[in-house]
């Protein structure tokens, strides 16, 4: 049972991560927002810390 719960948590984290990456891509492709503005949006939308949000804006992931 515990492993099942942990698997569900991992899946949920993966879905959230995918959603954040897609949001960043959409903001970059469809808006004229700066990376600083995008960072503020994803921090607010996904309840991320600055450090967490920075990883999604890293050019290596763009």
Image: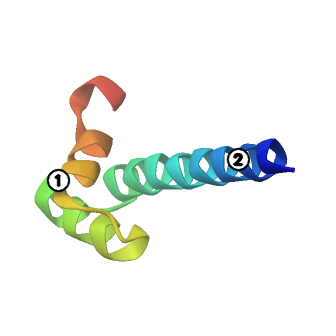
Q: Is residue 3 left or right of residue 22?
A: right
Mark 1: few/some/many CA within 10 Å (<14, 14-19, 20+): some
Mark 2: few/some/many CA within 10 Å (<14, 14-19, 20+): few
Q: Residue at x 60, y 44 (%)?
A: 14
Mark on residue 45?
Answer: none
Residue indicated by mark 2: 6
Counting residues from the N terminus, which is met first, the one under dot 2 or under dot 1?
2
Q: Residue at x 31, y 62 (%)?
A: 31
Colour pattern: rainbow
Q: Secondary structure at mark 2?
A: helix
Residue indicated by mark 1: 35
Up-down: is 5 above or below 59?
below
x then y, percent, for residue 2: 78, 49
Q: Residue at x 20, y 69 (%)?
A: 40
Q: Is residue 10 left or right of residue 19?
A: right
Q: Quadrant of residue 39?
A: bottom left
């Amino acid at each position: 049972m515990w492993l099942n719960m942990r698997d569900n948590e991992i899946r949920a984290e993966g879905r959230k991560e995918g959603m954040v990456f897609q949001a960043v891509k959409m903001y970059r492709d469809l808006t004229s927002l700066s990376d600083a503005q995008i960072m503020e949006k994803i921090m607010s939308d996904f309840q991320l810390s600055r450090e967490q949000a920075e990883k999604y804006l890293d050019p290596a992931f763009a």
